[in-house]
Amino acid sequence: MPKKEIIALIDFFYPPFRKFIPLQTFRYAACGGANTILDIFVFFVSYNYILHKEVLHLGFISFKPHIAAFIISFLISFPTGFMLMRHVVFPGSVLHGRVQLFRYFLLVLICIVLNYIFIRLFVEHFHLYPTVSKIITTAIVVSFSYLTQKNYTFKAESTQVKA
């Protein structure tokens, strides 16, 4: 689906939310949510129907089926997420595409680590239920990710200090 059609579709659903969140935040939530659903769907299909819940042997290394499914889904959702963020959510960035891609990849790695750290912290140290821990972690990581993408990965304007 071309960029203009994706933006038109997302913006069609925006009016009821206009009083609560800015358009860019709404687009971020829509694109991020759609990409998350895609990621989970590809994981499910990969795990159950491509890998048939079996270890993936590549000759020199083997992956458990859930790890292989994670890698497959990541290889699809990572570029899709990047393209949605770059062209739909943050189209006004002044940074070159390769810089954005590197920063986006770095941010994704940081978010994976943050998910791991926060879930362990909330479950093992604060003794919260895993699902509650996941919800709190997701809120923290998504907020961090949005702010980082807006102000770093897809920076819209130069922040030079004038003398």
Image (tube, rainbow, N blue to C red):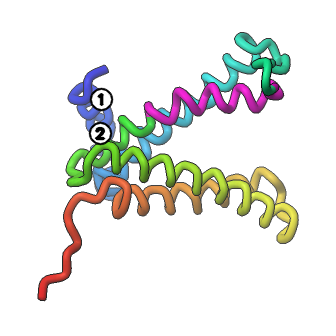
In the picture as drawn, the residue positioned furthest to the bottom comes out as 163
**Stretch in magenta:** 62-80
Q: Position of residue 20 (x, y in %)?
A: 36, 58
Decide whether residue 139 is among the magenta residues.
no
Residue at image coords 36%, 37%: 84
Q: Amino acid at mark 2?
A: Val
What residue type is disc 1 on? Ile
Instruction: Name the element at disc 1.
Output: helix
Tell me: residue 40, above or below residue 132: above
Nearer to the camera, 124 or 99: 99
Mark number displayed over residue 88: 2
Identified at 50% across, 36% down, the residue is 78
Find disc 1 in the rendering and name its residue. Answer: 6
122 left or right of 86? Answer: right
Residue 71 magenta-highlighted: yes
Q: Position of residue 134 (x, y in %)?
A: 71, 53
